[in-house]
Amino acid sequence: MNIRKDSIMYDIIIVGGGPAGLTAAIYAGRANKSVLIIEKAGFGGQMTHSPKIENYPGFKEISGNELADLMLEQALALGADIEIDEVTAITDGEIKKVKTTFSEFEGKTVIYAAGVTHRTLGVPGEEERIGNGISFCAVCDGAFYAGKDITVIGGGNSAMQEAIMLSELCASVTMIQDMPYLTGEAALASVIESKSNIKVITGAKLLSFAGDNGVSSVKILHGGEEKDIACEGCFIAIGLIPSNGALKGITELDKYGYIVSDEKCLTDSNGIFAAGDCRTKSIRQITTAAADGATAALAACRYIEGR
């Protein structure tokens, strides 16, 4: 493992070790650029929650952890250094200073690829079932629940889109919304109403998950009574939280906290690039994160070479 070196001016500092950050490191390494990846937790990001990935090119089936290990191994083989720490601030200027909890690093450019975290409910039985009965992405995991009865937690646009997609695969979909109505677009609500295998329970609070191996039921509080709803899986769709706090005041963020960037992954700060789920975009998948990583790395290389 390549641990970061003290007193080095890196060509590219990458914040985040998910598919976007690791792909950026691979492309930058192949361009003979010195690279530091700073990751606060575990490499691989959100994809490590997926025990089975079947939509990543080149692999009929692979776990998120296996794919993350392969990406990291390739980045390290190309010379990337790593630091396990949390980025707390970035100082803009000709030389970028990246401050972490315990250190400070300097680089000519920064690729910010810290990703997002899914909002969770914080109820009993949830944490241990994420990736084993609890999912966040119908595109990623919907096929594993074909023909089954599942629940979707949430009532906004994302939840309704998930429910509609899952209704084409699953025997039944039960939406559980804590508000007294669905809060997404009327057009999506109309589609939900037209689906005979989608049931909507509003004004319900989810209390806990149960199941010996995965999820077999959820407990809700509805109409003043506790009720158990049998299901064979659950999709939580109550929002995403971009991990962009270190860029606040440095680079433009939209009203939801996502980095504003163009298709070239350029931000409004020279030498700072955004890649992956943390930036403004319409599709958030492993493949699109990897594409961002490649784009951002090549843009950073051009920036360095043009200085």
Image (cartoon, rainbow, N blue to C red):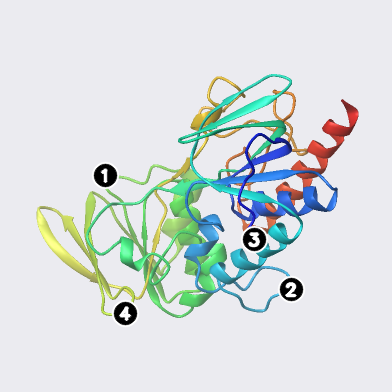
Q: Residues within 10 Å of mark 1 (few under 14, many from 20)?
A: few
Pick the residue in front: 276 or 173: 276
Precedes in sequence: disc 4 or disc 1: 1
Residue at image x 69%, y 36%? 8
Precedes in sequence: disc 4 or disc 3: 3
Give the image location of residue 307, x and y in percent. Answer: 87, 25
Residue where numbered disc 2 is placed:
58
Q: Residues within 10 Å of mark 3 (few under 14, many from 20)?
A: many
Residue 72 bears which disc, if any?
Answer: 3
Give the image location of residue 102, x and y in percent. Answer: 47, 36
Marks 1 & 3, CB-CB < 8 Å contact: no
Marks 4 & 1, CB-CB < 8 Å contact: no
Vertical arrangement, residue 211 with respect to residue 3, above or below: below
Rounded to the nearest whole Å, what is the CA distance between mark 4 and mark 2? 30 Å
Precedes in sequence: disc 4 or disc 2: 2
Direction from residue 285 to residue 159 in the image, left or right: left
Residue 213 bears which disc, if any?
Answer: 4
Precedes in sequence: disc 1 or disc 3: 3
SS at badge 1: loop
Q: Residues within 10 Å of mark 2 (few under 14, many from 20)?
A: few
Precedes in sequence: disc 2 or disc 1: 2
Give the image location of residue 29, x and y in percent. Answer: 79, 51
Rounded to the nearest whole Å, what is the CA distance between mark 1 and mark 3? 45 Å
Rounded to the nearest whole Å, what is the CA distance between mark 4 and mark 1? 32 Å
